[in-house]
Amino acid sequence: MRRMVTGGFPALLRKEVLRFWKVSFQTVAAPVLSAILFLVIFSHALARHVEAFPGVGYAQFLVPGLAMMSMLQNAFANASSSLIQSKITGNVVFILLAPLTPVDLFAAYLLAAIARAIVVGAGVILAVAWIVPLPFPNLLWLAAFAFAGAGILAALGIVAGIWAEKFDQLAAFQNFLVMPLTFLAGVFYSVDTLPPFWQAASHLNPFFYAIDGFRYAFFGQSDVPPWTSLAIASATLCALSWMTLRLLRSGYKLRH
Amino acid sequence: MAVPAVEVRDAAKRFGAVRALDGVSLTVEQGEFFALLGPNGAGKTTLISALGGLVRPDSGSLRVMGRDVGADYRDARRQLGIVPQEVVFDPFFTVRETLELQAGYFGLRGSRPWIDELLERLALAGKAGANMRALSGGMKRRVMVAQALVHRPPVIVLDEPTAGVDVELRQTLWQFIRELNAAGHTIVLTTHYLEEAQALCSRIAMMKAGRVVALGSTERLLADFSERVLRVKLESGGLPPALAAGATRDAAGWHRIPVENAAQVESALARLRESGSRVSHLEVAEPELEEVFVRIMGRGDAPAGAAVR
């Protein structure tokens, strides 16, 4: 059997990580700052909001959701913008001419996007820890949901980056799919407080499970049992990964 | 016998209604310096892209050093270094990083000495730490050459490598490529500078509308499709009838007399002297690939079967 991951994989992963790290002011610092602004504004505006969970203040409740929202958006942005930039500038040719397998490409873009998500997420939490006191999280749950959530959006980002031919197509993907799904995933509220229809709708949104589970890692409380969330998030990640690999194997929009 | 460096059999590729490759077959032996010529849109770049796996042919087979570019793509790509036609680069990285990453994609470790040598040979050593964005067009192109060579491929394909490169650097580049060829690398080249192809390449394929319309040694093509001519300008008198038969005269007053060898040059000059005409200017023009090219491209849709051997 052929090896699916070749000796070329580490170099591609390194390239993808360096790519965002070299411009970390816009890829890491900027999203951390936006998350802090969200937190300051919402926690002030809604300070008298009822406690989402018993014993958990609204500002506290917000932090994991905002961190996860930033992680999801940045995982998507990393994979999709790297691919579309390479396609539009034409330098994707250097990757396509190399003996890299579809699994190499998938794994490198996915893991680099997850790496950026984790750096951003850690940045958000560490930055707001000065303002909002948080309990020490359960690291296993934290890591599991960080990986699954960022992975889902990284895979989606790869698909969008392959599919889009222009930046505005990518922006459409981001504005009409990624943004609504992240905003409506229970970042700012507990979905238990929603009317039944919107509760049901939220449960169809895979991003909701990533956020709900991530919050569980901090508070030990959640809308949905964490194992259920993890199962759904992991299943979504697996399905999207399978689809992304098929797309890469087919050469769709990359090899003509 | 060694496997051919490049072996293409009946390769066909359509893009919508356009037959970019319309049954291309050709073989390049190891160690050759081979030119792929043709007007824009002839299918040269599509053929090169198919060798590198950037384009998937609809039918036919392509092999690099005996490795099928589809079924055995990883091995085939290790054998092949392509310098793409368009100048492209990744603006996030320096020259050295670009080369180190490219070596890494091929799973290579410890490429530093070779990368240093490439930088030196391509006159990029002083720019190793510079960001790709800061380079001139010619320098970017040389980085692309280095990228194609970073895994020391036995077969090197250059798609118009000298477009936009100044004369001095063009010489440096060809000197380097010649050395690589002398060291055993097979070189396949496309260019619009036909004199470059004539000077460098031992064999030539000409493509037109997705087909190979001529294929043969440079010498053979020149002998079959071009001729040596004696060009004279006369101060007084005209061409004697014996010479005027095969000759033509251009607007500037040059008479063009076909000659096969030096003896014929001598006898033509003797006839001119005998006729009393006085020669004011004289030159012997060697066969030119440009003439071959113009004739072959101009002669209607010759089927590939009519290719010269």
Image (tube, coloured by chain):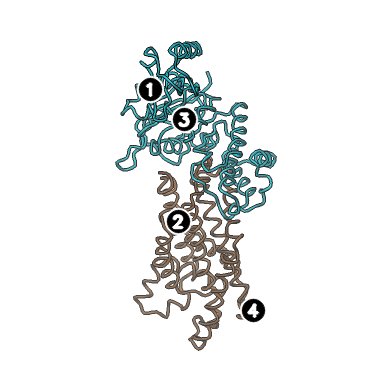
Q: Could you tell me the amino acid type at mark 3?
A: Arg
Inter-mark Cα distance, 3 to 2: 31 Å
Mark in front: 4 vs 3:
3
Residue A220 vs residue A107, the one in the foreground: A107
Q: Which residue is mark 4?
A: A130
Q: Which residue is mark 2?
A: A161
Q: Is label 1 on the same chain as label 4?
A: no
Inter-mark Cα distance, 3 to 1: 47 Å
Looking at marks 4 and 2 on the same chain, the residue that comes earlier in the sequence is marked by: 4
Classify mark 1: helix, strand or loop: strand
Residue B260 position, x and y percent, is 46, 14
Q: Which residue is mark 1?
A: B248
Q: Residues within 10 Å of mark 4 (few under 14, many from 20)?
A: few
- Can you tell which mark lies on residue B63? 3
Q: Residues within 10 Å of mark 3 (few under 14, many from 20)?
A: many
Q: Marks 2 and 4: in contact by CB < 8 Å? A: no
Residue A114 position, x and y percent, is 55, 60
Q: Could you tell me the amino acid type at mark 1?
A: Thr
Mark in front: 3 vs 1:
1
Inter-mark Cα distance, 1 to 4: 92 Å
Q: Could you tell me the amino acid type at mark 4?
A: Trp
Q: Could you tell me the amino acid type at mark 2?
A: Gly
Residue A39 vs residue B302, the one in the foreground: B302
Q: Is label 3 on the same chain as label 2?
A: no
Q: Is label 2 on the same chain as label 1?
A: no
Query: Based on the displayed image, in which of its 4 quarters is residue B38 positioned?
Result: top left
Image chain in brown: A
